[in-house]
Image: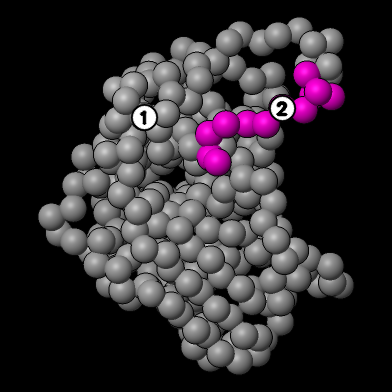
Amino acid sequence: LFMIPRVSKDDETTSSKQPHPPKTPAPYEINNSNYSNFYNPLLKSVIVPSPYKVDTTGKMTLEPRFGGLLWNFTSRFCIMSCSLIAKFFLRFCTKSTTIYNKEPFVRVLMDPNRTRPILTVANHLSTVDDPLLWGSLPFCITKSTRTIRWTLGAQEICFTNNFLSHFFALGQVVPTVRGAGIYQPAMNFALDKLNEKEGNWVHIFPEGKINQTSSMIPLRWGVGRLMMESKNPPIVVPLWHKGLETVMPEERDNPFVPILWQKVVIAFGEPIDLKDVLTEFHEGKAE
């Protein structure tokens, strides 16, 4: 579902008329330490927003001008503030907020002995899905960088000027160029975070854009790359939520002001351990 793209005959005809770019490795060809296959013409005209930097191989790093303790303190303050605002909104600005089955996820996330990374996936209903979804979790998750999510954010929306770029970087959001494919620097950065020893948490919206219809659209297969190429197979936790599309509907006069007193439902799925399946697949034992 996540890893096999479907190509129509029309797509094949169109692609055959265009010059072929250098071949990139398939998601199952593991090459975590080398980004030499990085290539996408769309990215040549894109300026990577500070404080993120990208080298010639496509490897992205976070290099703030004022790093170290000052950056960490400011980042923690920013994340805690957003968490409190999200909690306040869910508690006092909605008609009701119903949360299902969050305890298994919280146990896995807060486990002090956990060495595996966590990958959460959710449907994307509005521009406020993140951080409002995490307002449903205990405030104690903001006390450690290990239990604070990294997430991908659209560069043309979240990183449009210097202030917003630093604000979202402080909030552990990674600038992503939509349409640039699964081998772009932002995906490399997310994969690096999953591969760190701390057991980081990465969140992704597999639909790739806001979808306020009643059904899911085809999922982008970048989430498949994160699962397949992680050195330590992540624990996958799916989420499904409803109601935030009425809080921030796409078609309205003022797109920046939320509509209050709506019903919100957030459901956490059971944590899924794919370690055995991925191990068998990499060893050629799974089909």
Query: Quick one: 11 or 79, which is closer to the camera?
Result: 11
Relative side of 236 to 125, left or right:
left
Residue 225, position as x, y percentages in the image: 47, 33
What main secondary structure does the magenta stretch of the protein show?
loop
Q: Quadrant of residue 278?
A: top left
Residue 93, position as x, y percentages in the image: 58, 88
User: Amino acid type of disc 2?
Assistant: Val
Relative side of 62 to 141, left or right:
right
Q: Are marks 1 and 2 in contact (CB under 8 Å)?
A: no
Q: Residue at x 71, y 82 (%)?
A: 259
- 286 magenta-colored: no
Residue extending farthest to the left is 113
Q: Mark 1: give few (<14), some (14-19) or many (20+) Cα within 10 Å.
A: few
Foreground tag (1 vs 2):
1
Locate the N terminus by quadrant.
Answer: top right
The answer to whether 163 is drawn above or below residue 40 in the figure is below
Q: Residue at x 70, y 9 (%)?
A: 20
Q: Mark 2: give few (<14), some (14-19) or many (20+) Cα within 10 Å.
A: few
Q: CA distance from mark 1 to mark 2?
A: 24 Å
User: Start and end of the magenta stretch?
Assistant: 1-12
The answer to whether 255 is drawn above or below residue 144 in the figure is below
How many numbered circles are shown? 2
The disc, 1 or 2, on the residue closer to the chain's N-terminal end is 2
Callout 2: SS: loop
Relative side of 6 to 191, left or right:
right
Residue where numbered disc 1 is placed: 286
Callout 1: SS: loop
Q: Residue at x 37, y 19 (%)?
A: 31
Residue where numbered disc 2 is placed: 7
User: Amino acid type of disc 1?
Assistant: Ala
Q: Residue at x 29, y 55 (%)?
A: 145
Locate the C terminus by quadrant.
Answer: top left
